[in-house]
Image (tube, rainbow, N blue to C red):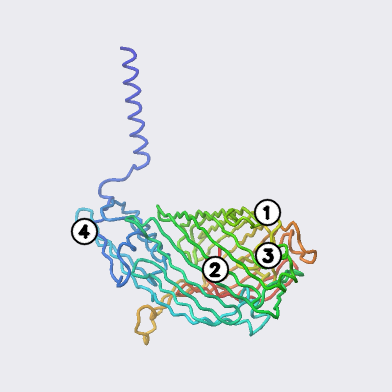
Amino acid sequence: MRMARVIKILIIGFMLGQALVTLAQDPLIIDDDRLVIEDIIIRGNRITKESIILRELIFGIGDTILKMELLPALQRSKDNLLNIALFNFVFFDANHLSSGRINVQITVTERWYIWPIPILEYAERNFSTFIKNREWDKINYGIWLKWNNFRGKRELLSGKIRLGYIKEYALAYQVPNIGKKQQHGVSTGFNMNQQNEVFIATVNNIPVEYKPQERPAMVRLNAYTNYTYRRKLYTTHSLQVEYYNYNISDSVAIVNSNYLGEGRTSLNYFVLAYTFNHDDRDSKIYPLEGFAVRIKAEQMGLGIIPDYPYPVFRLTGVFLFHQKLANRLYFYNTTKARYSDEKEMPYALNRGLGYSEFLSGYESYVIDGSDYFITKYNLKFQLVKPTTQTIPFIGMEQFNKVHYAIYFNLFADAGYVNNVFPDPTNTMVNNWQFSTGVGFDFVTYYDQVFRIDYVINRHGEHGVFFHIETPFFRW
């Protein structure tokens, strides 16, 4: 009997404890605070399937949501829809019905999806380098066809013919939403790149160009297949297999026997890569709040081609953090690091900073190495809030509304590249490099950001630098 009473007391105590915990977590919520989503009504999607839009919402038909959470849920869902780059504008509204029920109305303005884009571009590593060198023969021209939202299912079909300084032929197809729950995706493509001039080496921290008499100097073929799994809204896993084939002219291999290693004129290898990506930022184009983490593990050389001499494992991590500090005042930090277990690599495969990633104020320089670390800090003030203007004489809704914003930036960059076998003239490797400056960002529609910066680096070099890009895509 005594034991039974003890058990009863324990059970009653446990139940009271659970009740107290529930009350502590949700002390003021009553039925009137809850809303039931009766229906979701979508307008403006002439091409896009409704299922693509519904996939990006953080709520669904029949869900119950607290009144205090409704506006944040609508805003987060709006950000999600803008981040898939199918719409120029997205508007949400809630129509309150009787008995705590609501209808959510979504109005979208679709982008123009078929782009036969003329190519007229510089072939330098960045726009500032092109402006500094003013080598007008380094111009590419051609046509790039992009069919976004192919069949209204967010598919992407693209083909490219680039001529001029660098010749390129490419074709790619991407299907991101496969299955009943749209959690799977696949993509495939190939790219052939032909150059009559190559960076043959790095001397005094500057890439040295070489143009052999025989043409071309290098031909590179790349083919890939990628699978993605996205169970939740903000986390994606991907597995990719790539094939690379390099062929260089005999004179390139003579001038730099380590270009492909050991005097080779050709190199073939496979790459297997896994990427984890979590991104809950408010915007992938120009984020102001939220964070993203990306980890990539790749194995170069899978044993399929037995004579490939440089099997290397690389691990790359990226962290991006954005926070609003006060009205119109924002902070962000971007940090990226790469580690390679093989330190002695051919010149063509041993690129560090100065290409897709670079330190501000170091646009002219290249810092080669197997491992690197780069971090950027930015304090930005919103001079012009996101503003929409209608151009009355343009009849197409995909183009007659322009949105823009302007930000003033105060920033500092730092980076380090590890190179076990450096050229003695390349003094920037194995040393910390840093810079600081101020600048302006002009953000406009169709994912374009125009930057102008005034920067001074560790060596006292200073100047004005220009960039035209979608900056966070390269990370």
* Quadrant (top left/top right/bottom left/bottom right) for the N terminus: top left
Q: Amino acid at mark 3?
A: Leu
Badge 4 is on which residue? 97
Q: Are marks 3 and 4 in contact (CB under 8 Å)?
A: no
Query: Distance between the Cα atoms at labels 1 and 3?
Result: 15 Å
Toward the front, the furthest residue is 306
Toward the bottom, the furthest residue is 393
Crowding at dot 4, Cα within 10 Å, few <14 / some 14-19 / many 20+, comes out as few
Is label 4 in a helix, a strand or a loop?
loop
Badge 2 is on which residue? 471
Toward the left, the furthest residue is 98
Badge 1 is on which residue? 342
Q: Is 467 in front, or is 129?
A: 129
Query: Distance between the Cα atoms at labels 4 and 1?
Result: 64 Å
Q: Position of residue 228 (x, y in %)?
A: 44, 57
**Residue 26 falls left or right of residue 319:** left
Is label 1 in a helix, a strand or a loop?
loop
Badge 3 is on which residue? 260
Q: Which one is in front in this view, the residue at disc 3 or the one at disc 2?
A: 3
Q: Are marks 4 and 1 in contact (CB under 8 Å)?
A: no
Is label 2 in a helix, a strand or a loop?
helix
Q: Earlier in the sequence, mark 3 or mark 4?
A: 4
Q: Amino acid at mark 4?
A: Leu
